[in-house]
Image: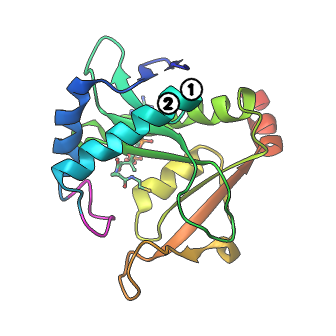
Amino acid sequence: MAELRTERLLLRQWRDEDLEPFAELNADPETMRYFPAPPSRVESDTLAERARQHIEAEGWGLWAVEVAGGASFVGFVGLARPSFEEHFTPAVEVGWRLARARWGCGYATEAGRAAVAYGFEELGLAEIVSFTSRLNRPSWRVMERLGMSHDPADDFEHPGVPAGNPLRPHVLYRLSREAWSVSHSAV
Ligand SMILES: CC(C)(COP(=O)(O)OP(=O)(O)OC[C@H]1O[C@@H](n2cnc3c(N)ncnc32)[C@H](O)[C@@H]1OP(=O)(O)O)[C@@H](O)C(=O)NCCC(=O)NCCS
């Protein structure tokens, strides 16, 4: 089972103690403003449990993020397979959700870079995607910092968001292993 270390962070398996701060994060309306509805406590726990089971079964997934020598849980970052069908699925996406107090530190980008490297180097993926509501600028800015590219022709209406909801139009970003290798070796 993989744990990923970066300069400041540890991406690790979930622990029971993460459930409370994860529920707090999920109950914050500002953090969840680009989601159609904030998850209930039960849904928050279920999400964490699914992430834990996925990491247990596959060795990778949406890891709990800890600040090395600091906060023991600041949110999740990692890789997942989208659970819905769209023109770009099946696929592996990179995603993130951090507690509001931890925004503006570069943590999502730092952890996202480690997750992407794991996907290409260890899983041998040919491509990693990421998507978010068109309105979620902070999230698509992370995608751009990761070197992902956006073709408006890829954008889609998220099937899990009701028609007419302004959060339904989604942007899709892609990163191929070739493009990543070039930018990675240039660093
Ligand atoms: C999306 C989300 C993870 C983005 O968080 P973020 O903190 O803006 O993104 P990063 O971690 O990449 O941090 C980048 C910021 O940290 C700043 N920063 C500070 N110190 C830094 C450092 N040492 N290294 C890099 N960046 C640093 C950058 O300048 C940048 O600030 P700016 O946006 O004002 O230019 C966060 O808004 C979030 O969790 N939102 C709620 C959940 C969500 O919407 N998830 C996506 C659903 S698809």
Which residue is drawn at the image coordinates 38% and 88% (left, top)?
A: 164
Of residues 167 and 135, which is closer to you in this image?
Answer: 167
Answer whether labels 1 and 2 touch (C-beta < 8 Å).
yes
Residue carrying label 2: 55
Residues packed near mark 2 inside 10 Å, few (<14), some (14 to 19) or many (20 plus): many
Query: At which x and y percent is residue 169?
Result: 48, 77
Please give the label number shown on residue 81. Answer: none
Residues packed near mark 1 inside 10 Å, few (<14), some (14 to 19) or many (20 plus): few
* Residue 35 among those drawn in magenta: yes
- Disc 1 marks a residue whose amino acid type is Gly
Which residue is drawn at the image coordinates 49% and 17% (left, top)?
A: 7
Query: At which x and y percent is residue 10?
Result: 43, 20
Does residue 178 appear left or right of residue 16 in this picture?
Answer: right
Above or below for 16 versus 97: above
Residue 104 visible: no
> What residue span does the magenta drawing correspond to?
30-37
Residue carrying label 1: 59
Instruction: Tell whether circle 1 marks a residue whose Cβ is less than 8 angstroms from ligand 1.
Output: no
Above or below for 118 versus 24: above
- Residue 97 appears in which quarter of the rendering? top left
Which residue is drawn at the image coordinates 75% and 40% (left, top)?
A: 125
Q: Main secondary structure of the magenta part?
A: loop
